DNA sequence: CCAAAAGTGTTAGGCTTACACCCATGC
DNA sequence: GCATGGGTGTAAGCCTAACACTTTTGG
C-alpha cells in the first residue's frame, strides 16, 4: 500500500486504563494502579498504560494492557476520552486515549497482580498520580456513575452470585451516597433482570440473604422491546 | 528536554470535526461537509479534518480546522470519540479524534464557505462519506441528542433572537420526532432561562411570534444552585 | 431471648402526558 | 371575514420519595 501521508508528522499515541474493581467486604470502589517502571517518573503511581503498536487498534492496545496486567480477557471496557495537551507528559509529546474497565476482582489471580506490582487503591484514597492521570480518573469515575445509572454494568464488578444488600452497597459506593433500601429493591426487582437463587449468603448475618443472579439475556430481550434500564434511585 | 520515548513508534494523529448547523427556514439539522482535496479519496465527501501538529493540542487542532473552514472562533466544541482501527484510513495508519461543533449558520461568511468548497447537507440526506466518517457522524449525532436534552446547547444553533416555535422546531429536527407544543413551552418557560423581548418575528405569520433570548448567566447561576436543565419532553 | 441484619408496603406529592380552543392579523 | 400560525390551561395517572416495623436465626 502506498503511504500517502509519509511526509507528515507523527506522534506517540498511548492508551491508559482506569480499571475499576469492587471489594464486597469493605464496600469500596477500587482502582488498579501501578508503580511506573520506566523514566520519566520512574517508581511513581500511575495508571496502567502503554503505547499503541503497529497493527494494533486503539481498543486492542487497551485490552492488551489490561490482559498483561491481569490475565483477563472479555472484560467490560469502554473508551473514555482522548488527552492531547502538548505538555501533559513530561517525557515527550504523547497523546493518550483513556479507557475504563470494570473487573470482577474475584476472577483475578493475586500472583499475577503481585508480579506486575499493581495495587488496588480505594477511589477515596488515591495516591498522587503522574501527569494528568488524576483528571483521567475523575472523568472515568463520572462516566461510570452516569453509565451505571442507565446500563446494567454494576454486575461486572460483582461475583456471579450476589445479594441485594451487596448490590446496593456497590451502588452506594459508586454514587457516594446512601440509597433507600426499599426503593432500591423495588426498582431492581421490578426490572425482572435478576433471578433469585435458593441459596443464601450466611457470612454477614444470622438470617442470611438470598443470592441473586443477573441474566444478561433478559436485558437484551427487554432492550429490544424498548425497555430502558434505570437505577437512578433515591 | 530529553525525549524519553525517542525509540518508540509514532503514529499519525488527526482530528475530524462534525460541524452541526441549523436552518430555520427548512427546519433541518445540517452538517458541514467538504470534498476532500488530497489523495487518497480525492474529491470524495468527507468530514473536515486535519493532522495534529507539533506544539498543538488535540482540541487546538480541532479548533484550527474549524477556524480555517469557517473563520469562526469561540464555538461550542466537544470531544466526541477516538477512532483507532488499524485500517480505518486507506491512506495509511491514522488515528483520529472526532469532535462535534455547534455553529450558528447566520454568523457564517458564505464567501469563506464557498472558497473552502464546504457544503451544508441535511443530516437526513448525507452523501456517502469516506472511511468510517458515517459512523463518526452517527456517534456525534447521538451525542448531540443526549447533550441537548440536559444542557442548553441548542441556542448555539440559533440566532441571538428566536421564537419559541423556532426553538421547538430545532428540538424536533434533532430528536427527529414531534413534541407537544404546550408541554414544550411550559417546560422551557418554567426554567426561567429565556427573556421575552418586545419584538415580534412577523415573516412566517400574520400574528407574529415573540422573540426570546437565552441568558447564559442565569443558567450559570441556577446551575450553581443545583438546577439541572432538562428539555426531554414529549 | 436478644442482637443483628434481611426483608417488606403504603401514601403523598410532583412531574409528565394528553388534549382543544381562542387570539391576532394580513389579505 | 377567513385563513394562518401563535398562544394558552387542566386533569389523570404514573413515578418517585419518604418512611418503620417484622422476620429470621445464631449465639
Image: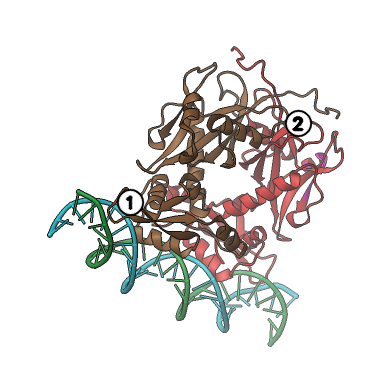
Chain colours: A red, B brown, C green, D cyan
Residue placed furthest toward the top? A2
Badge 2 element: loop
Query: Which mark, residue B202?
Result: 1
- Residue B51 shows up from this direction: yes
Front-most of residues A222 and B222: B222
- The subunit letter for the residue under badge 1 reads B
Crowd tier of the residue under label 2, counting other residues whose Cα lies within 10 Å: few below 14, some 14–19, many 20 or above: many
Q: Is residue A116 magenta?
A: yes
Q: Residue A201, relative to residue A126: is it above or below?
A: below
Q: Residue A41, relative to residue A227: is it above or below?
A: above
Residue A159: horizontal and vertical position, in percent? Answer: 64, 52
Residue at image coords 50%, 18%? B41
- Considering the image in quadrants, where does the C terminus of chain A appear? bottom right
Badge 1 element: loop
Front-most of residues B117 and A221: B117
Asked if labels 2 and 1 share a chain, the reply is no
Cα gap from disc 2 to disc 1, whole angstroms: 55 Å
Q: Residue B228, relative to residue B31: is it above or below?
A: below
As drawn, is A51 to the left or to the right of A150?
A: right
Front-most of residues B200 and D20: B200
- The subunit letter for the residue under badge 2 reads A
Front-most of residues B66 and A128: B66
Q: Residue D26, relative to residue B50: is it above or below?
A: below
Front of the two marks 2 and 1:
1
For the record, the magenta segment spans A113-120
Residue A227: horizontal and vertical position, in percent? Answer: 43, 53
Amino acid at each position: 500500500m502506498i503511504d500517502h501521508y509519509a511526509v507528515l508528522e507523527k506522534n506517540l499515541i498511548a492508551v491508559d486504563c482506569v480499571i475499576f474493581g469492587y471489594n464486597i467486604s469493605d464496600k469500596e470502589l477500587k482502582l488498579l494502579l501501578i508503580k511506573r517502571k520506566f523514566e520519566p517518573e520512574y517508581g511513581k503511581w500511575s495508571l496502567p498504560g502503554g503505547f499503541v503498536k503497529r497493527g494494533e487498534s486503539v481498543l486492542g492496545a487497551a485490552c492488551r494492557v489490561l490482559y498483561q496486567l491481569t490475565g483477563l480477557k472479555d472484560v467490560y471496557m469502554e473508551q473514555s476520552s482522548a488527552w492531547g495537551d502538548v505538555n501533559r507528559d513530561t517525557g515527550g509529546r504523547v497523546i493518550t486515549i483513556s479507557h475504563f474497565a470494570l473487573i470482577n476482582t474475584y476472577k483475578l489471580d493475586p500472583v499475577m497482580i503481585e508480579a506486575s506490582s499493581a495495587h488496588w487503591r480505594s477511589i477515596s484514597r488515591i495516591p498522587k498520580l503522574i501527569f494528568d492521570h488524576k483528571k483521567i480518573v475523575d472523568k472515568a469515575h463520572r462516566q461510570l456513575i452516569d453509565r451505571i445509572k442507565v446500563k446494567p454494568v454494576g454486575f461486572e464488578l460483582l461475583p456471579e452470585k450476589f445479594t441485594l444488600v451487596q448490590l446496593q452497597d456497590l451502588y452506594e459506593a459508586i454514587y457516594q451516597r446512601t440509597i433507600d433500601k426499599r426503593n432500591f429493591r423495588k426498582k431492581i426487582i421490578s426490572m425482572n433482570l435478576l433471578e433469585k437463587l435458593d441459596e443464601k449468603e450466611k457470612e454477614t448475618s444470622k438470617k442470611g440473604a438470598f443470592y441473586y443472579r443477573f441474566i444478561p439475556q433478559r436485558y437484551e430481550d427487554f432492550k429490544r422491546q424498548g425497555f430502558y434500564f434505570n437505577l437512578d434511585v433515591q
